[in-house]
Image: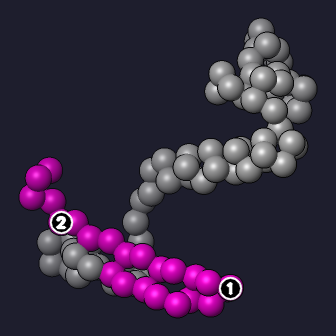
Amino acid sequence: LDDAPAGGAVVVYQDGKCIAQASIGLARANLSWSPDTLSLNFSTGKGVLATLVHVLVAQQLLAYDEPIASYWPAFAAQHKGDITLRHV
């Protein structure tokens, strides 16, 4: 909905210590967003996972053109044995 409440929070850690935090907006129509407001996060792990994969490729621990089943044999089930990391 265009008129739905909107808000959010951000926390920044450096060397294990919180160096900045902020929250803004509304959690609900009558409730401000606060540091302890719970929220749902969809798909936020995809960017982290993609970055991790690129780091592992750079460290030569994974290869884009290697079948995934060479790392995870059970993945080959249902005719998926030739699918590579690049395909995914």
Mark 1 residue element: loop
Along the line of sight, the residue nearer the viewer: 30 or 22: 22
Q: Residue lying furthest front in this view? A: 58
Report the magenta stretch's main SS. Answer: strand
Q: Which residue is mark 2?
A: 5
Q: Position of residue 66 (x, y in %)?
A: 83, 24
Position of 22 compared to 50: left or right? left
Position of 46 compared to 53: left or right? left
Asked whether the viewer can see residue 74, the reply is no
Q: Is residue 82 above or below residue 18?
A: above
Residue interval drawn in magenta: 1-23
Q: Is residue 33 above or below residue 5?
A: below
> Between disc 1 and disc 2, whose residue precedes?
2
Q: Is residue 64 above or below residue 18?
A: above
Q: Position of residue 15 (x, y in %)?
A: 68, 85
- Is 16 in the magenta? yes
The tag on residue 27 is none
For badge 1, the amino acid type reads Asp
Q: Residue at x 46, y 88 (%)?
A: 20
Q: Residue at x 62, y 84 (%)?
A: 14
For badge 2, the amino acid type reads Pro
- Coloring scheme of the render? one colour
Cα distance, mark 1 to mark 2? 34 Å
Q: Residue lying furthest left in this view? A: 3
Q: Residue at x 70, y 45 (%)?
A: 54
Give the crowd class for mark 2: few <14, some 14-19, many >=20 residues within 10 Å.
some
Position of 22 compared to 77: left or right? left
The tag on residue 15 is 1
Q: Position of residue 19 (x, y in %)?
A: 52, 90
Q: Residue at x 15, y 60 (%)?
A: 4
Along the line of sight, the residue nearer the viewer: 23 or 84: 84
